[in-house]
Image (cartoon, rainbow, N blue to C red):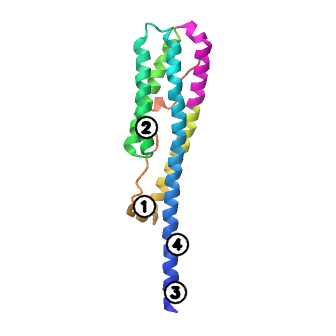
């Protein structure tokens, strides 16, 4: 009789540990999936930027430095995204992507502020359409980033509570880093209105 009790307790303990492990794996896969949505939206954003710069190029002939800064910032953000895609949740990768996104947002803000001085550019149909698409994409990036950060928080909470923390440490479930904007003034999407 005592052997059966030990066996039942052992089986229940194994089921409990497997349940914890599977929950951690599910949460980790959840935040990685949420990051893939950020990837989709940021890739769309990066694809729009060269078209925006090409449209503005004809009007901003004397503003080459600004246009080159936007392209350089876009390329830096693409590199940051590639590093983050390779390791979603990794603190260094998330910090690199966050910094690159901040630089890109600032350079786009300068481009749009500069374009206000060019009425023909503001009235250009292609420029208006691209700016509308970029605004829509910025909103999607914001929603995807929020979903990712929520999934990261859920995963981190799950790996830090007892007894999960013991199993998480034993199986190397490392802390995931949310995607944050470093400067409070950068939390808003850039203004892209050409009306």
Q: Mark 2, mark 1: which one is toward the viewer?
A: 2
Q: Which span of residues is magenta-colored?
A: 118-138
Q: Which residue is mark 3?
A: 5
Cα separation between marks 2 and 1: 27 Å
Nearer-N-terminus badge (4/2): 4
| In front of the other: 51 or 173 | 51
Rate crowding at label 4 as few (under 14), some (14 to 19) or many (20 or more) other CA atoms within 10 Å.
few
Nearer-N-terminus badge (4/1): 4
In percent of width and height, residue 9 lies at 50, 81
Helix, strand or loop under label 1: helix
The label shown at residue 82 is 2
Residue 103 can be seen, yes or no: no
- For the point 40% across and 62% down, the residue is 171
Do the residues bearing badges 2 and 1 touch, measured as CB atoms within 8 Å? no
Cα separation between marks 4 and 1: 16 Å
| In front of the other: 183 or 110 | 110
Q: Mark 4, mark 2: which one is toward the viewer?
A: 2
Cα separation between marks 3 and 1: 28 Å
Q: Which residue is mark 1?
A: 168
């Amino acid at each position: 009789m005592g052997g059966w009790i030990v066996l039942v307790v052992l089986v229940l303990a194994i089921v409990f540990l497997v349940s914890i492990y599977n929950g951690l794996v599910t949460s980790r896969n959840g935040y990685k999936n949420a990051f893939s949505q950020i990837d989709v939206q940021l890739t769309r954003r990066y694809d729009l930027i060269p078209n925006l710069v090409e449209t503005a190029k004809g009007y901003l002939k004397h503003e080459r430095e600004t246009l080159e800064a936007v392209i350089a910032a876009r390329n830096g953000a693409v590199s940051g995204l590639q590093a983050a895609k390779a390791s979603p949740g990794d603190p260094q990768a998330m910090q690199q992507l966050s910094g690159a996104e901040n630089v890109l947002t600032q350079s786009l803000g300068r481009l749009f502020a500069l374009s206000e001085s060019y009425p023909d550019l503001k009235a250009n149909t292609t420029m208006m359409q691209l700016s509308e698409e970029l605004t829509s994409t910025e909103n999607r990036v914001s929603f995807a980033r929020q979903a990712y950060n929520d999934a990261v928080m859920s995963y981190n909470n799950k790996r830090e509570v007892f007894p999960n923390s013991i199993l998480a440490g034993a199986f190397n479930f490392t802390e995931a880093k949310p995607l944050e904007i470093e400067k409070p003034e950068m939390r808003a999407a850039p203004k892209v209105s050409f009306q």
